[in-house]
Structures are given as structure tokens and as C-alpha cells.
Image: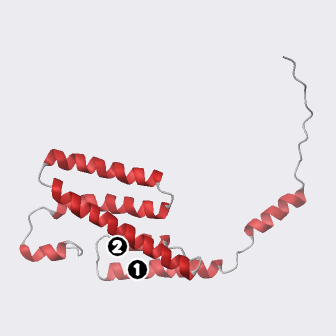
Amino acid sequence: MATIAQKSTRVVPTAGLVRGISERGTRPISERAALVARTTVAATLVMMICMTFRISYGFQGAIYALLITRESPRATLRSAGTILLVTGIGAAYLLISAGFVINISVLHFLWIIGSFFVAFYALSAMTNHGAAAIFAIMIAVGIPCGITMYQPKPMWKIPLGLCWRH
């Protein structure tokens, strides 16, 4: 087959075009400084509270403070509600399923593998990546916590062992 050679019509960007794109890209967006300040203050306050009261796994609170959308008050409430819902789903999954498999070591090992598979599958399949990340964090933090939670402890340390360092 014969092909016809076509002439290439390539447009070379001029210096003015490149300068215009770079100026638009680096121009401060209105309210960005206030948004960054609110996010930074929220994450800092959460970590100060967690460090002051020595709350275990306090890093999750800082991550949640960074993941909450602050585009508008409605988006903030929707994002916080999603985080609360996914955290509850993750905690319920861990607590309910761990009770079934904690005493049988082979089944417990398979549960750990299956839980990590579910977490990674959620990261790839869910369209809300913030919710998927929160679910994966709950699984990744909850599995080691579940392993150490069922070790024998004195009775007075059991309520403190769930959320306080000893």
C-alpha cells in the first residue's frame, strides 16, 4: 500500500504563551492561605491533644484532620460524615471478624491475609479515595492491635489498654 506523506503542522509555543501559563499556574488562589492555615491548625491541635493525653494511635486523628475536605461547609460535613461512617465500618469489621478467628491460629493467619486483601482491593476499587484510605488505615492499625489485645493482662489494665499507653 502506498501512503501519502503528510506535512506536519506543529505549533511552537511562543515565549508569551509560556509566560502566561506559568503566571496563571503560580497565581495564588483566593482563600488558599486561609485554607492551609485552617488545615494546619486542625492537625496541630489534634496532635497536641493526642500527645498531651498520650492517646495511642493519635496519628489517625491528624490524618483525618488532613483528609477532611474544606471546600465549603456542606462538603466539610459530608467529608467528616464519610470518615465517621468508614471508621465505624472498619472498626465493626475488625471487632466482629476477630472474635471468630482469634483462637484458631491457621484461621487467624488466613483472616490477616484476607483483611489486607480487602483493604488493598478497597483502595483500588472505591471511587472515594479518602474513604478507601481510611478503611485501609483502620485495617492496617487494627490487625496488630487485635493481636496484642487478646494477650492475658491484669484485669485493671484491660479498659486502659484499649486507648491509653501503659
Q: Is residue 55 left or right of residue 83?
A: left
| Residue in view at x 26 percent, y 61 percent | 94
Which quarter of the image is occupied by the N terminus?
Answer: top right
Residue kind at label 2, given as amino acid type: Gly
Disc 2 element: loop
Colouring chosen for the image of the structure: secondary structure
Residue position for label 1? 46
Q: Quadrant of residue 6?
A: top right
Return the residue nearer the eye: 59 or 103.
103
Residue 28: x and y in percent read 71, 74
Q: Identify whether 139 is placed above or below 63.
A: above
Residue kind at label 1, given as amino acid type: Val
Q: Is residue 57 visible?
A: yes
Return the residue nearer the eye: 143 or 165.
143
Return the residue nearer the eye: 147 or 23.
147
Q: Is residue 18 left or right of residue 101?
A: right
Which quarter of the image is occupied by the C terminus?
Answer: bottom left
Q: Is residue 147 left or right of residue 17?
A: left
Q: Residues within 10 Å of mark 2 (few under 14, many from 20)?
A: some
Residue 41: x and y in percent read 50, 82
Sequence order check: which comes first, mark 2 or mark 1? 1
Residue position for label 2? 58
Disc 1 element: helix
Q: Are marks 2 and 1 in contact (CB under 8 Å)?
A: yes
Q: Is residue 147 visible?
A: no
| Residue in view at x 38 percent, y 70 percent | 85
| Residue in view at x 54 percent, y 80 percent | 74
